[in-house]
């Protein structure tokens, strides 16, 4: 296996254990928020893929709302969320222009 220095582990002090608990809690919250955003985007993309302009138009506000919540909760960066919004809006406008 690998040679050299062994991996150093922090001692299990109270502060380290508390930090581990906080990290697990934050990770769970972030995972929940990210899942909610991805599900909203997935629903929107499914409507866009089916060329359902009316259905996608109904989902726009919900999807944008979820993205804005993710920005506020610092799950997504603002640029990333705005990029998602922009691409979804472009796809929706393209479908509307075809009809």
Image (cartoon, rainbow, N blue to C red):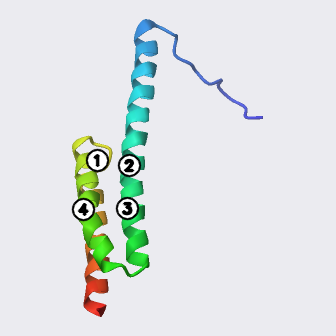
Q: Nearer the viewer, residue 51 or 64?
A: 51
Using residue 32 as the reference point, say whether residue 96 is left or right of it.
Answer: left
Using residue 18 as the reference point, say whether residue 12 is left or right of it.
Answer: right
Q: How far apart are marks 1 and 3 (CA)?
A: 13 Å
Where is residue 90? Give x, y as percent.
27, 78
Marks 1 and 4 in Cβ contact (< 8 Å): no
Which type of secondary structure does the marked residue at label 4 adopt? helix
Q: Name the residue under label 1.
A: 70
Q: Distance between the residues labelled 4 and 2?
A: 16 Å
Q: Distance between the residues labelled 1 and 4?
A: 11 Å
Q: Mark 3 points at which residue?
A: 41
Q: How far apart are marks 4 and 3 (CA)?
A: 13 Å
Q: Which mark is residue 82?
A: 4
Which type of secondary structure does the marked residue at label 1 adopt? helix
Q: Which mark is residue 36?
A: 2
Q: Residue at x 31, y 84 (%)?
A: 95
Mark 1 neighbour class, 10 Å CA radius: few under 14, some 14 to 19, many 20 or more = many
């Amino acid at each position: 296996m690998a040679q050299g220095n062994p991996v150093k582990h922090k001692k299990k002090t109270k502060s380290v254990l508390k930090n581990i608990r906080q990290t697990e809690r934050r990770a769970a919250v972030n995972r929940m928020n990210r899942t909610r955003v991805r599900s909203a985007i997935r629903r929107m993309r499914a409507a866009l893929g089916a060329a359902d302009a009316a259905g996608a138009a109904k989902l726009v506000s919900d999807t944008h709302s979820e993205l804005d919540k993710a920005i506020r909760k610092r799950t997504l960066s603002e640029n990333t969320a705005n990029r998602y919004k922009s691409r979804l809006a472009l796809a929706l406008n393209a479908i509307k222009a075809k009809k």
